[in-house]
Image (cartoon, coloured by chain):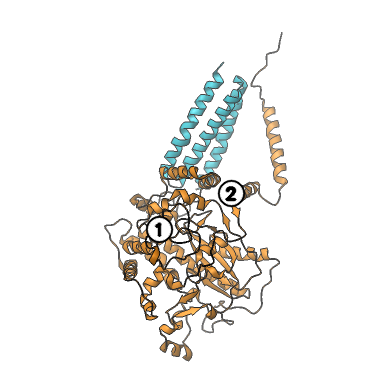
């Protein structure tokens, strides 16, 4: 008689054997890499496969490229048009009107009948910008040397202050290695509030060649002591002949630029265009006025010179690319790996150079931008080009009078004049391009997975991914429901329970 | 709140994966799967788990449309694959 075999004879003892063996196998694998967590190791290997590291700046720059002056920036030229004119330069009436409309609305306007532009939304915008306005004044409009971005490099504490560490100490701190120094600086930046931080060499190409600064030196300090007779004399003689400074007036020769990125609120940006979206940007600007200053004081206390900068001193986007924080994009914003374009950027210039520099990295953004064009479609003023490929010269309809475009860098050129016009219409800094970008996602695993898969795929798949992104409901703009969602307490757990 | 939504998600995925693999092994002992059956059922199981992961994660991030689309785009193929897999397994 043959023995009948039970096909599912998997007894408890067998289960324990399999379980025990699996546990031993797993524990052995984990023990073989004691210094790094297994998940982190796998994650790093995947990221290394998707991300390309470059030795040089990843965008082609031609010899005829000329670094801009800070008043070549459309916003600076518009808002400080009287000073620019006083120096003998022409300013387009149209941008003066756009700037005036923008400033008037930013300061005074709200409309209780318009969702996202009510008094309550305006109060949110005002609060978000408050720290930036107070501490860094005109720095967002590229004006340097004010408040927390002051160039002053004292070597002694302020005798009028109770506590003051904002001076360069005599003894220079020593680090074990360049990597050790980079680790310390990055950890400090993160502690002070930066979400991303990278370190790169100072590159004169990305610095403003000259600076307009119409504010008299005595009025630039947030917490001044009593004015000296020399300062009073300088104030009396202040005029257009003193508005321009350049790197010869800078207190030291910068060798290193530390670039920081600050995440802007996802739900806030989903409401664009609105004062809530503006408040998400304003909160970023307030961080830009605080964290770089703290890092500059940190460097001064290590014995080195340092100056904090937000939009002033240099072009933040190429510096962020050079420091490995992200990649260039169609909309001209840096797209970071973790937060996409939903970041604000700030910098610290220092003469400390015993530090490991980061390398530029790319992860397929510029390739994706060729097919996507969601930012260009969402832009209400048509400022973002629909060109398939980037170019060295602007191609938009104002290209012949586009004094605001840098030429000679291979990128997508934005029509800044058109962009600025919409700021005047909305009374906030728009941000619809950032909200519409498929890389603008909350920090969730499935988006990083999709980004990774997209980066590995060829162009036609990018078209499909763009369509799917839209179909799945991401990147909506002008969505009144987004305003309700922003204020809704659902899922927010304010008390932490 | 002791566990966050994402923690609950991955814990549940672990439980579902274990149950799913257990069920496949169980039915393999009964029906002796062929290669086609294996591939169809495992694809269906993967899509089913991915559908739950995607939809739950989208719901947690506050994107209900993405959550619903996840159910349609990954959930329906998952069901199709699992039904096909069942058909292949029962085929003599």
At x 43% / y 87%, what residue is drawn? A235
Residue A434 picture location, percent across and down? 43, 55
Quarter of the figure with residue A56: bottom right
Residue A142 picture location, percent across and down? 45, 71
Specify whether residue B41 is in view: yes
> Foreground residue, B29 or A236?
A236
At x 42% / y 67%, what residue is drawn? A404
Label 1 chain ID: A
- Which chain is displayed in orange in the rendered image? A
In the drawing, does residue A161 fall left or right of residue A401? right
Question: Which SS class for mark 2?
Answer: helix
The residue that label 1 is drawn on is A431
> Foreground residue, B37 or A22?
B37
Label 2 chain ID: A
Question: Which SS class for mark 1?
Answer: loop
Q: Colour of chain B?
A: cyan
Specify whether residue A193 is in view: no
Q: Earlier in the sequence, mark 1 or mark 2?
A: 2
Seen in the picture, residue A22 relative to A241 is either above or below; the reply is above
The residue that label 2 is drawn on is A50
Query: Mark 1 vs mark 2: same chain?
Result: yes
Residue A275 picture location, percent across and down? 36, 60
Seen in the picture, residue A451 relative to A254 is either above or below; the reply is above
């Amino acid at each position: 008689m043959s023995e009948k075999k039970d096909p599912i004879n998997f007894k408890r003892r067998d289960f324990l054997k399999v379980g025990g063996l699996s546990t031993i196998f797993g524990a052995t694998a984990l023990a073989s890499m004691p210094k790094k967590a297994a998940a982190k190791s796998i994650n790093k290997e995947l990221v290394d496969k998707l991300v390309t590291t470059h030795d040089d700046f990843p965008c082609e720059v031609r010899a005829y490229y000329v670094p801009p002056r800070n008043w070549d920036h459309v916003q600076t030229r518009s808002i400080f048009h009287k000073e620019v004119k006083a120096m003998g330069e022409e300013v387009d009436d149209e941008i003066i009107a756009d700037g005036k409309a923008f400033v008037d609305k930013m300061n005074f306007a709200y409309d209780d009948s318009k969702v996202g532009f009510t008094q309550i939304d305006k109060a949110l915008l005002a609060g978000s910008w408050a720290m930036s306005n107070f501490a860094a004044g005109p720095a967002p409009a590229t004006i340097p040397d004010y408040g927390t971005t002051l160039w002053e490099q004292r070597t002694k504490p302020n005798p009028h202050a109770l506590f003051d560490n904002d001076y360069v100490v005599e003894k220079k701190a020593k680090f074990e290695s360049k990597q050790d120094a980079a680790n310390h600086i990055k950890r400090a930046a993160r502690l002070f509030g930066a979400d991303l931080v990278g370190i790169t060499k100072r590159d004169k190409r990305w610095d403003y060649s000259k600076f307009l600064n119409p504010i008299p030196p005595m009025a630039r300090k947030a917490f001044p002591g009593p004015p000296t007779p020399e300062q009073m004399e300088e104030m009396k003689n202040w005029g257009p002949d003193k508005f321009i400074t350049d790197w010869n007036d800078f207190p030291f020769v910068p060798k290193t630029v530390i670039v920081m990125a600050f995440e802007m609120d996802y739900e806030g940006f989903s409401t664009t265009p609105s004062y809530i979206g503006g408040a998400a940007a304003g909160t970023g600007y307030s961080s830009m006025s605080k964290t770089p200053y703290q890092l500059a004081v940190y460097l001064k206390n290590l014995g080195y010179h340092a100056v904090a900068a937000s939009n002033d001193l240099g072009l933040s986007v190429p510096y962020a690319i050079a420091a490995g924080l992200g990649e260039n994009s169609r909309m001209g914003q840096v797209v970071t790996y973790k937060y996409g374009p939903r970041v604000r950027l700030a910098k610290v210039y220092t003469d400390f150079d015993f530090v490991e520099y980061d390398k530029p990295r790319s992860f397929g953004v510029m390739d994706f931008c060729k097919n996507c064009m969601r930012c260009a479609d969402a832009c209400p003023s048509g400022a973002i080009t629909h060109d398939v490929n980037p170019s060295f010269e602007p191609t938009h309809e104002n290209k012949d009078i586009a004094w605001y475009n840098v030429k000679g860098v291979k990128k997508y050129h934005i029509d800044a004049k058109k962009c600025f016009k919409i700021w005047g219409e909305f009374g906030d800094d728009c941000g619809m391009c950032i909200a519409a970008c498929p890389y603008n996602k909350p920090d969730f695993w499935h988006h990083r997975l999709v980004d990774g898969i997209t980066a590995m795929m060829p162009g036609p798949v990018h078209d499909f991914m763009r369509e799917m992104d839209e179909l799945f409901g991401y990147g909506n703009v002008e969505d009144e429901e987004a305003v309700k969602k922003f204020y809704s307490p659902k899922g927010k757990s304010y008390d932490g329970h | 709140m002791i566990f966050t939504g994402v923690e609950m998600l991955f814990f549940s995925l672990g439980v579902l994966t274990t149950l799913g693999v257990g069920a496949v092994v169980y039915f393999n002992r009964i029906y002796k799967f062929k290669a086609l059956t294996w591939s169809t059922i495992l694809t269906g199981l993967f899509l089913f788990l991915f559908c739950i992961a995607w939809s739950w994660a989208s719901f947690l991030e506050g994107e209900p449309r993405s959550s619903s689309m996840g159910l349609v785009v990954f959930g329906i193929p998952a069901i199709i694959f699992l039904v096909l897999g069942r058909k292949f397994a029962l085929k003599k």
